Image: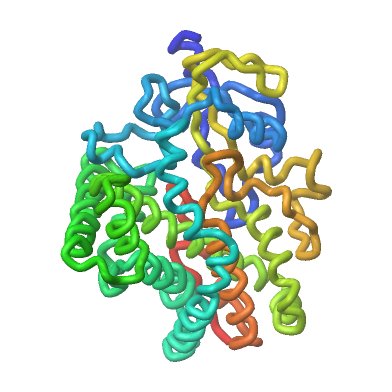
Amino acid sequence: MTATAATDLPLWPASTLDHGPFALLDEEQRHRLAGPVTRVRLPTGAPAWLVTRHADVRQVLRHPGFSADLERPGFPLLRPLPPQSEPDRQGGFIRMDGEEHSRLRRMLTAEFMIKNVRRIEPLIQQTVDAALADLAAAGPPADLVETFALPVPSIVICHLLGVPYADHDFFQARSRTLLDRTTSTELVRAHAQELRDYLRELVVARHRDAGGDDLISRLVRDRVATGQLTVDELVGMALLLLVAGHETTANMIGLSTLLLLREPGRFAALRESPHRAAELVEELLRYLSVVRTGLPRLALVDAEIGGQVIRAGEGVIAVLSLANRDPEVFDDPEEFDPYRQAHQHLAFGFGVHQCIGQPLARAELRIALVGLADRFPTLRAAVVPQQVSTRDTSVVFGLNSLQVTW
């Protein structure tokens, strides 16, 4: 396809992708973009294949012929990225393929198994209770994002990793910079390096005293000291977990609260039937799908996806949010149904790269929402949805703030 032809393609992600917090596409956009595999133009000007149907997205994400390595020539980037040095590339296994990816991921699998997450649920509950007390002291009205949604997962991931929560302003600000698609290449490079330097200091400190029970200490003691893991790899792993470990869940808590507050009975149901919260969380994950820009992949081999042949060297964007509203899989997908069996959703991705921390994210979201409904039975939004400030340029969609009262 010529560069001239590429300019005639629909732009993805469109600037009007989000019509308020909940509507992903208007009818015209859905007609153009949702459905069969179609060609689009990325913000960088490069063409790519857009994959939006549930079955097609699953096929791409489990296919070994599609690479997640953004360093490969032709990889479909949503924005220009700064060149990385070899140490910078290490440890971020979410962007690795094959055995390199598997080796690093295996070192963390046990940490995030459901049985291990259940063991830390008391810690999550304590964190939620403390944040609820802070929310009560701050208002009404109060900013639910700043006082509750962001601190809960941040404190938990800091505890698990062994990162001082006192430094949360530092790493939260830089995390948002890295996820914002409008951030300049220079600032992305600078803030990424600052985070790596910060985490490297923590890793070096654990080398001197690795007697702690946090994840970084255990990896230093069990993996770095035995030569199975380098310091650069551990820094990269810690950076990935720190950023992903608070950003996605924080945005889900804020968006979920706003959505549930549209019908007061939904919070009442959480108080009266907290055992149903796990099912509700699955529907929230399906309906909100905070990773809305899609997962980029590069075809390494020719492959047929949804009846369309994608050639080796061509880019693909697998759109989780639209796959989660596929009418072939979910009845009335544009409707939020708290009683829906939504376990087939793809909010955490699919295949070998699916989110390793999903058991933790589910537990945090469930405990946070049940606690919020129980502590504030009269909770309501202090602004209408149209006035809510959303993070439209972020790779992870969410709210900048949410004023609530009770």
Q: Residue lying at the far front in this picture: please name it.
A: 226
- The image quadrant of residue 83 is top left
The number of numbered discs placed on residues in the rendered structure image is 0
Report x, y in % for residue 70: 39, 31
Q: Is residue 28 above or below residue 166?
A: above
Judge from the rendering whether residue 52 lies leftward or rightward of residue 99; answer left or right.
right
Task: Please provide percent x and percent y for residue 93.
Answer: 40, 41
In the image shown, does 218 or 288 lie closer to the viewer? Answer: 218
Q: Is residue 121 visible?
A: yes
Scheme of colours in the image = rainbow
For the point 25% across and 53% down, the residue is 225
Question: Which quadrant holds the C terminus?
Answer: bottom right
Q: Is residue 15 above or below residue 168?
A: above
**Residue beneath the point at 32% across and 52% down:** 223
Residue at x-position 60% and y-position 28%: 63
Residue 231 in percent (x, y) is at: 23, 49
Residue extending furthest toward the top: 2
- 255 or 211: nearer the viewer: 211
Q: Nearer the viewer, residue 95 or 167?
A: 95
Residue 176 in the image, given as x and y percentages of width and height: 36, 55
Is residue 268 toward the left or the right of residue 221 in the image?
right
Q: Is residue 264 in view from this perspective? A: no
Give the residue drawn at x 30%, y 46%: 229
- Image vertical order of residue 286 relative to residue 79, above or below: below
